[in-house]
Image (tube, rainbow, N blue to C red):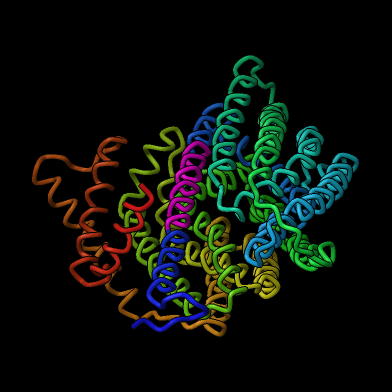
Amino acid sequence: MSQNILGHPLHILCQRGLTHAMTRGRKLLYNTLLLTGAAMFMRAAVVSFQVYLAGVIGAAGIGLFQLVASTQFLAMTVAISGIRFATTRLVSEEMGLGKPGAVPRVMIRCFSHALFFGTLAGTLLFLGSSWIGNVWIGDGRTILSLRLAAISLPFISCTAVMNGYFTAVSRVAKSATVQVTDQIIRIAFVVALLTLYPPDGLEMAAAQVVLGGVSAEILSTIKLFLLYRHDKGSLPKSNGESPHLTRRLLGISMPLAASSYVRSALNTLQHMLIPRGLRRGGAEGDQALASYGVVHGMAFPVIIFPSAIFYAVAELMVPELTASQVAGNKDRISYLVSKLLRIALYLSIGLAGLFLAFSGTLGEVIYPHTPGVGAYIRVLSLLMPIMFLDAITDGMLKGLGQQVYSMGVNIVDSFLSVVLVYLLLPIFGIQGFIWIAYFTECFNFILSLRRIAQITTIRLALSDVIKPALSILAAVYLTLWLLRTFGLPLVSSAGSLILHFLLAGVIYLALLRLLGCITPQDLRWVKRLVSSSA
């Protein structure tokens, strides 16, 4: 006879636990696929948009817009002030503790926080635009763009709250849909403005790009708020008390905000110093902007394009790990951490190998009118595993309440970047910037991985690096040999490039399976989740 626990047969309890775990797994898989698909679409749209802008305003125009964007990012950091993660964490805690009725009270405090900091950031940016443009950036052509960007900041902060809410309640379909339509509207607005009113110089070109983004941001906020109003009515009602909400909110958001301020200021300073450092090294004004635009505005968007997968997983793991931590389930935490790191390692090494092998064609296909981008893609491709693993690790640390440590590492990383850019760029030029990126990314990832190894049990081996590295190398050579045998050499065309990527990817996965990196248990687990989700 089965043993009884509180009146329930043991096999029924086990079945319920398994069903609950599968339900959580299906939700996580569904949300990951959905958010990844949306993010990949938006990254593709951004790269395509960058190609369009490069043809309309040139590399120097891209460089000027990147200077505006880096300053706008600093203002956005002040506007958001840690509220997105704080919303996700607080709502996840209330749901995990069985008190969904407290969620509306959490959201009221989060919206108040967002409106205060969003309005403050917008006011400061608008009033300080002249000084920022002339002194901080050192280019008065950015002033108009900065003033336009200031209008969007309260809307951006409120959008962060609602995205955090939808992530916490595992209904990312709504926010993902809005993000996709927002990106489409943003691009459509900018294209319409540049077509109907051809810009007279780089100043107006940058301003029109910013104005299109501001318009889309306002519409996005309105749509998300309507969806939130409809969604919150579906939450279960409960009368559970949730004391000290404001204190808990500030306890999460303000440490994040303080470190984000410092890091964003340092990142913005770094981007301001890059054109100046290149000019100190002998480059002309617009030539320095063009070099900066090619590396940061063209090559980097291609390199970080696949990171949408990793950032989606990292974001969705915050409520999953938080719930496991609240429940005291250490075994599940270690299992999730090890599984995610191993999958991210295999995927990132495979992507790096593909981008390295086909970098020249990538540059020619994506930026046909800007020679030399492929060379930078090749150099930066080896950085992809470090960048993507760092994104996953950072998300897991936040989900486990280690955001303060993560912030400290990020601040030190940004500080080192600024110092190295100031010292090395005038000597080594744009190549120095690339080596700085390698050093700081490795520094950040090593410290983050060390921390997560201290608080969880990571099950990784050296073979988890060697096997995928050898597999992608073999997959690329087999792909080139097979396609050349059948008369299909790699040429500068999108169709041929896609064919090479797909075939190499299939061979890579097959080799991982043969080498035991992908086990039958892994395949059954994924199949079970996919069939259950369907």
Placement of 3 over or under 39, stated as above or below: below
Magenta segment's dominant SS is helix
Foreground residue among 474 and 456: 456
Quarter assignment of residue 216: top right
Q: Is residue 465 magenta?
A: no
Q: In the displayed structure, does residue 237 sit left or right of residue 20? A: right
Q: In the picture, which quadrant includes the N terminus? A: bottom left
- In percent of width and height, residue 300 lies at 51, 50
Q: In the displayed structure, does residue 67 sit left or right of residue 471? A: right
Specify whether residue 238 is in view.
yes
Q: Residue at x 37, y 39 (%)?
A: 364
- Of all residues, the one furthest to the left in this rendering is 485
Placement of 98 over or under 405, stated as above or below: above
- Tell me which segment is drawn in magenta: 26-46
- In percent of width and height, residue 245 lies at 81, 63
Quarter assignment of residue 37: top left
Specify whether residue 376 is in view.
no
Q: In the displayed structure, does residue 423 sit left or right of residue 356? A: right
- In percent of width and height, residue 76 lies at 74, 48
Placement of 372 over or under 397, stated as above or below: above
Q: Residue at x 61, y 19 (%)?
A: 192
Foreground residue among 309 and 355: 309
Q: Residue at x 64, y 61 (%)?
A: 95
Q: Residue at x 54, y 72 (%)?
A: 445
Quarter assignment of residue 90: bottom right
- Of all residues, the one furthest to the top in this rendering is 196
Foreground residue among 382 and 501: 501
Q: How many marks?
A: 0
- In percent of width and height, residue 237 lies at 69, 52
Q: Is residue 31 magenta?
A: yes
